[in-house]
Image (cartoon, rainbow, N blue to C red):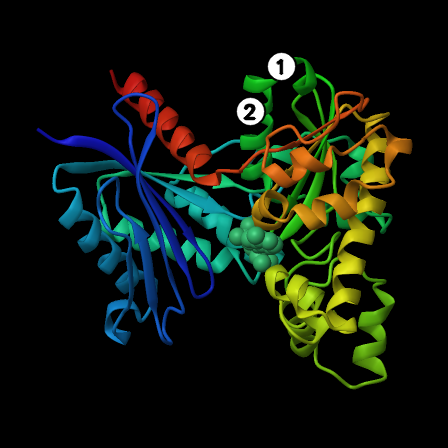
Amino acid sequence: MTQPVTLTLNAGSSSLKFSLYDITGAPVQLAIGNVENIGRQPRLKASLGDGVPRVERELSPSEASDHPSTLKTVLTLLREHFPKAHAAVVGHRVVHGGPRFSEPMAVTDEVMAELRTLSPFAPIHQPHNLAGIEAARAAFPDALQVACFDTAFHRHHPKANDVFALPREYYDKGIRRYGFHGLSYEYVSGELKRIAPLLHAGRVVVAHLGNGASMCGILDGRSVASTMGFTALDGLPMGTRCGQVDPGVIFYMVQQEGRTIDEVRDIFYNKSGLLGLSGISNDMRVLESAGVPEANEAVDYFVFRIRRELGGLAAALGGLDALVFCGGIGENSRKIRRRICDGMDWIGIELDHDRNDSGAQVISTDFSRARIMVIATNEEIVIARAAKRLLSEQAGAGA
Ligand code: AMP
C-alpha cells in the first residue's frame, strides 16, 4: 500500500530546502532537510524521522551541480527511507506572486509564464524558486505542483500601504509595496487564533527576525502594514541586506563612485545589514558573543530599527494587543527580545524577564496591557496544508 505524501520545496540561489509530509489526514511531518552550496561544495543536512540518525554529509559536485541534480539526490534519499511514499502533490515556496496571486495556485504553463514575468521584481529569489518548480515538474510529471507565495498574505492590505509616492503609472506597472514572509505570518497568525482567539481578533505585530527579517501589523488576522516593500530588501536590517536606506544613496554610489548597478545590488543584498555594519558576521550568535564595538553597533542598529517599526506598526493598527516573536533570532535570542521590549511600557508591553529567560511561550508580565509571545514559525506546514487542500479540490472537481 502507498502512503500519500506531499513534498515541499524552497529553492534558493544555491540551496534547496525540502520537507515531506504524510497527508493521509492533517499533514504530519516525516522529514525535513536542506542542501546548501549547490554547485560549489554541496552539503546535505536532513532529519528523516523518529529513530533515524540525523544525516549530515558533503555531497559530491555531481550529486548537486544544479537544482535538478540536487532534487534527484534528495529524492533518492527520501525514497530509501520512505519506500511507500507517493507524492501526488509538490508544494513550492515562491517569493513573488505579483499583484494577482493572493492564494496558493496550481501551477500550469500559464501560471509559470506569469511567474516568470515577475522575476525582475525578485531577481535574487524568483528565478531559483521557478527552477525548483521546473525540476519538480520533470521529476514528478503526473503530480500536482502548487505554488505558495510570500506576498499573498499582504495582498489585501490597504491601498495606502500598497503605494509608493511615485508617478501613478508606476503603480499600474506593478511597482507596489508587496510585503514578504507571508507564509510565516500566516502560520503565526493561525497559531495565535488557535491559542488565543481574542488576541488574534485584535491588533497584533509579528516580528519575524531571522537572517531575513521583517515585521507585520495584523488586524483580525489580516495584514495591514509590513516593513518590507517592493522587494525583500526594505525595512529592518537583516543578515546581509541593508533594510531601509534613502534611495539617494544609490544615485551617489552610481554617479559619484562610478559603481555599476550590479555592484550596488550586491552591496545592498549581500554585503550590508549585520554583516556590513559589523564587518564580522551576519550571524547574530557570533555578534552577541563578539564583544567588540563594531558588533555591538550592528546589534544596536538592529534593535533600534525594530523598536522604531514597532511604534510605526502600532500606529498603523491603532494600538497593540500582542507582540509575537518568531524566526531564528526572535525564537532563540532572549537578549534581543529583552532589548527590544525593555523601556517600551509606553506602548503597553512589559516583559517578564524570568519568563523570557525560561523559554516560555508567553513572556509578558501578568500586568502587561499587551501580551508578548514567542511562536516558533513553520512555513513548510503552511505549504503542505495548501498543497493538500488544492489536491483535494482538484480531486473533488474531477469526481
Ligand atoms: P533563520 O534565518 O530564521 O534561520 O535565523 C537565523 C538567525 O538566527 C541567525 O542570525 C542566527 O544567529 C540566529 N540565531 C539562531 N539561534 C540563536 C540564538 N540562540 N541566539 C541568537 N541568535 C540566534
Residue drawn 87% across the image and 48% down it:
165
Residue 197's disc is 1
Residue drawn 23% across the image and 46% down it:
140
Q: Quadrant of ligand 1?
A: bottom right
Residue 360: name its quadrant: top right
Residue occupying the far front of the picture: 354
Residue drawn 85% across the image and 25% down it:
319
Left or right: 100 with respect to 291? Answer: left
Q: Residue 291: x, y in percent?
A: 71, 69
> Which residue is at the front of the view, 194 or 71?
194
Instruction: Tell me which numbered mark, 2 or 1, is placed earlier along the sequence.
Output: 2
Left or right: 222 with respect to 73? Answer: right
> Which residue is at the front of the view, 62 or 373?
373
Residue occupying the far right of the picture: 346
Q: Residue 105: x, y in percent?
A: 45, 34
Q: Residue 383: x, y in percent?
A: 43, 36
Q: Secondary structure at mark 1?
A: helix
Residue 349's disc is none
Q: Secondary structure at mark 2?
A: helix
- Quarter of the rendering occupied by the N terminus: top left
Residue occupying the far left of the picture: 1
Relative to 290, residue 362 above or below? above
Residue 35: name its quadrant: bottom left
Q: Give the class, few, some or many, for how many residues have Cα within 10 Å of label 2's Cα (few <14, many ≥20).
A: some
Residue drawn 30% across the image and 17% down it:
396
- Quarter of the rendering occupied by the C terminus: top left
**Residue on which disc 2 sits:** 190
Can you see residue 100?
Answer: no
Q: Give the class, few, some or many, for how many residues have Cα within 10 Å of label 1's Cα (few <14, many ≥20).
A: some
Q: Amino acid at mark 2?
A: Gly
Q: Are marks 2 and 1 in contact (CB under 8 Å)?
A: no
